[in-house]
Image (cartoon, rainbow, N blue to C red):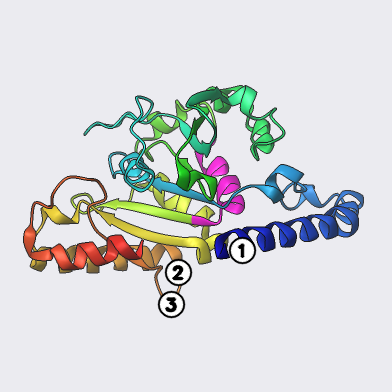
C-alpha cells in the first residue's frame, strides 16, 4: 500500500512539473532558440520516462553482465564474452513480452524517450536497439548499455557516429551514470577520458564500479583502488572523486574468498 501511494504521489509530481514546463518554460525556450546553445527542448516522453541508468566503460569491463545480474534477465540478446562483444547501444526497458525494437523505429515511438537520438543519423541508429523485457525491476527503472570504449583512432573513426556526443546526450537525460573499470586494466584510453570529460557537467550523477575485484588479493586491491582514484581525480578535476563500488557483479562465486564481506557489502550498497 505504501508503495502504491508513493507511485501515485510521484506520478502527480511528474504531471505537475510537466504542465509547468509545457505551459511556462517550453514556449520561452522555443522563442529564444534555446536549443542552439544548449540541449533541445524536452518532450513529453522524456519527462514521463522511468529513471534511467547509463553504463559506460572500456570493453569487457562487465557492463552487460552487471545489467543481467541486477535484472535477473537471461536473454540471448545479451552477448557476454571475454573479448569485446557489445557493439550497440541497448536500452533495456519494461514490456509485457521480450522483443527487440531497432533504432529507427524506437525513435518514432511516442512512449519511448529516445526521439532525440534521430539527430545522430542512420549510422548511429543502426547501432541502437531497445530490448523490451517483462522483468519487475524494469517497471521502476531502465538501463542503457553502451559499446566498449575504444582506444585506437582508426577504430573510433570506423564507428560511423560521434560516440562522445551520443554519450553526452544520454548522460544529460539519465538519472545515474555508472563508470565501469576492470581491476586488471586500469589504463584509461583517450576516448574514455574524452567521454568522462564530456559528462563532467553531470558529475553529480556519476558513480564508479571496480568490477572483477574478486580476482585479486587485498594488498593488490588497495594499490589498484588508489591508482584508479588518482587517475579519475585528474580527469574529473573534483576535490572528491565519485563513490566507488568494489565487487564482482555476476552470479559466480568469488575467486578470492578473503574479501567476501567487503564485496558483499558493496554489492548490497549498489
Asked whether 249 or 55 is in front, the reply is 249
Question: Quadrant of the rendered structure where residue 257 is?
Answer: bottom left
Q: Nearer the viewer, mark 1 or mark 2?
A: 1
Gap in angstroms between the C-alphas marked 1 and 3: 35 Å
Question: Is 167 one of the magenta-colored residues?
Answer: yes
202 vs 49, left or right, is left
Give the residue at x 28% y 32%.
Answer: 80
For the record, the magenta segment spans 162-176
Q: Which mark is residue 6?
A: 1
Query: Would residue 166 be visible to someone looking at this image?
Result: yes
- Horizontal and vertical percent position of residue 13: 73, 62
Residue 19 or residue 28, whichever sits in front: 19
Who's the residue at 16% across and 69% down the image?
Answer: 222
- The percent position of residue 49, horizontal first and vertical second, equals 64, 47
Q: Secondary structure at mark 1?
A: helix
Can you tell which of label 1 and label 3 is closer to the viewer? Answer: 1
Q: Residues within 10 Å of mark 2 (few under 14, many from 20)?
A: few
Mark 1–mark 3 contact, CB under 8 Å? no
Question: What is the distance, in whole Å, between disc 2 and disc 3 at their CAs?
Answer: 7 Å
Q: Is residue 106 above or below residue 206?
A: above
The N terminus lies in which quarter of the figure? bottom right
User: Which element type, helix, strand or loop, lies under badge 3?
Assistant: loop
Relative placement, left or right, of 148 versus 129 is: left
Q: Position of residue 184 (x, y in %)?
A: 18, 50
CB atoms of marks 1 and 2 within 8 Å: no
Q: Which label number is shown at residue 237?
A: 2
At which x and y percent is residue 18? 79, 55
Image quarter in which the C terminus is found: bottom left
Amino acid at each position: 500500500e505504501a508503495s502504491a501511494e508513493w507511485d501515485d504521489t510521484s506520478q502527480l509530481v511528474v504531471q505537475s512539473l510537466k504542465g509547468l514546463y509545457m505551459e511556462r518554460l517550453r514556449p520561452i525556450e522555443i522563442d529564444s532558440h534555446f536549443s542552439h546553445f544548449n540541449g533541445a527542448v524536452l518532450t513529453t516522453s522524456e519527462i514521463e520516462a522511468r529513471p534511467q541508468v547509463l553504463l559506460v566503460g572500456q570493453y569487457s569491463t562487465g557492463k552487460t553482465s552487471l545489467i543481467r545480474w541486477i535484472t535477473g534477465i537471461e536473454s540471448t540478446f545479451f552477448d557476454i564474452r571475454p573479448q569485446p562483444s557489445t557493439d550497440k547501444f541497448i536500452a533495456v526497458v519494461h514490456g509485457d513480452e521480450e522483443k527487440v525494437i531497432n533504432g529507427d523505429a524506437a525513435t518514432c515511438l511516442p512512449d519511448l524517450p529516445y526521439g532525440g537520438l534521430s539527430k545522430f543519423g542512420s549510422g548511429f541508429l543502426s547501432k541502437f536497439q531497445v530490448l523490451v523485457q517483462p522483468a519487475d525491476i524494469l517497471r521502476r527503472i531502465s538501463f542503457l548499455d553502451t559499446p566498449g570504449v575504444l582506444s585506437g583512432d582508426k577504430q573510433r573513426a570506423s564507428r560511423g557516429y560521434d560516440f562522445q556526443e551520443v554519450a553526452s546526450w544520454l548522460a544529460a537525460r539519465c538519472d545515474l551514470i555508472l563508470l565501469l573499470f576492470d581491476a586488471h586494466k586500469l589504463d584509461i584510453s583517450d576516448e574514455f577520458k574524452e567521454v568522462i570529460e564530456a559528462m563532467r557537467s553531470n558529475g553529480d550523477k556519476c558513480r564508479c564500479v571496480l568490477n572483477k575485484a574478486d580476482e585479486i588479493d587485498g594488498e593488490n586491491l588497495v594499490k589498484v583502488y588508489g591508482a584508479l582514484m588518482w587517475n579519475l581525480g585528474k580527469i574529473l578535476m573534483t576535490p572528491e572523486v565519485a563513490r566507488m563500488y568494489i565487487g564482482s557483479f555476476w552470479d559466480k562465486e568469488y575467486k578470492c574468498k578473503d574479501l567476501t564481506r567487503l564485496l558483499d557489502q558493496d554489492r548490497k550498497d549498489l
